[in-house]
């Protein structure tokens, strides 16, 4: 099944910090840009960092499998090998994780590797990989 790409626009307080984070650290190719926004290819999806001087994190959390998951958040579901490579790259870069790379829902249909971290503007991201990718939408 081929999925159409989604589009997400989100606020950032500093475009150069966003460029270093999304383009440099995460390795997302940069698309079009202007003085107040930058497009990125986020694992096949279009995300747009929009400059908003009043951008501020909205700290809220929900409990999930023993962790406090930040809300809102966005991210990607990667193949396990790519997830491991990204976890290693982020750990080597000294990223301060909200939830360090871990496995949750172990032994259940939703078993997944996951990690949560913030971009420089306080936007929360989750990068995950499914133990069995066909279970992405499986019910417990």
Image (tube, grey):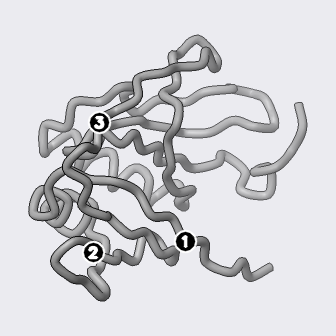
How many residues crowd mark 2 within 10 Å: few (<14), some (14–19), many (20+)? many
Give me the residue at 46% from left, 71% from top.
Answer: 43
Q: Give the image quarter of residue 22.
A: bottom left
Q: Position of residue 111 (x, y in %)?
A: 69, 35
Q: Which residue is mark 2?
A: 38
The residue nearer to you, when weighing 124 against 104, is: 124
Q: Position of residue 115 (x, y in %)?
A: 43, 36
Considering every residue shown, the one lying at the far top of the view is 66
For the residues carrying marks 2 and 3, which lies nearer the camera in this image? 3
Q: Position of residue 38 (x, y in %)?
A: 27, 75
Q: How many marks?
A: 3
Q: Which residue is mark 1?
A: 7
Disc 2 and disc 3: Cα gap in Å?
Answer: 18 Å
Q: Which residue is mark 3?
A: 56
How many residues crowd mark 3 within 10 Å: few (<14), some (14–19), many (20+)? few
Q: Give the image quarter of residue 59.
A: top left
Disc 2 and disc 1: Cα gap in Å?
Answer: 13 Å
Is 14 left or right of 33, judged from the image as shown?
A: left
Q: Is residue 114 above or below residue 29?
A: above
Q: Are marks 3 and 1 in contact (CB under 8 Å)?
A: no
Give me the residue at 47% from left, 29% from top.
Answer: 102
Q: Earlier in the sequence, mark 3 or mark 1?
A: 1
Q: Callout 3: helix, strand or loop?
A: loop
Is 79 left or right of 98, judged from the image as shown?
A: right
Give me the residue at 42% from left, 44% from top.
Answer: 125
How many residues crowd mark 1 within 10 Å: few (<14), some (14–19), many (20+)? few
Q: Earlier in the sequence, mark 2 or mark 3?
A: 2
Considering every residue shown, the one lying at the far right of the view is 139
């Amino acid at each position: 099944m081929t999925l159409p790409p989604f589009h997400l626009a989100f606020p950032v307080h500093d475009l150069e910090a966003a460029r270093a984070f999304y383009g440099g650290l995460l390795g997302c190719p940069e698309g079009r840009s202007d003085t107040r926004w930058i497009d990125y290819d986020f694992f096949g999806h279009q995300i747009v960092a929009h400059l908003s001087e009043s951008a501020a994190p909205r700290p809220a959390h929900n409990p999930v499998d023993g962790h406090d998951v930040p809300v809102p958040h966005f991210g990607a579901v990667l193949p396990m090998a790519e997830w491991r490579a990204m976890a290693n790259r982020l750990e080597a870069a000294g990223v301060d994780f909200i939830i360090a790379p871990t496995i949750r829902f172990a032994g259940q249909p939703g078993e997944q590797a996951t990690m949560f971290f913030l971009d420089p503007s306080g936007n929360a991201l989750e990068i995950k990989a499914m133990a069995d990718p066909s279970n992405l939408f499986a019910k417990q």
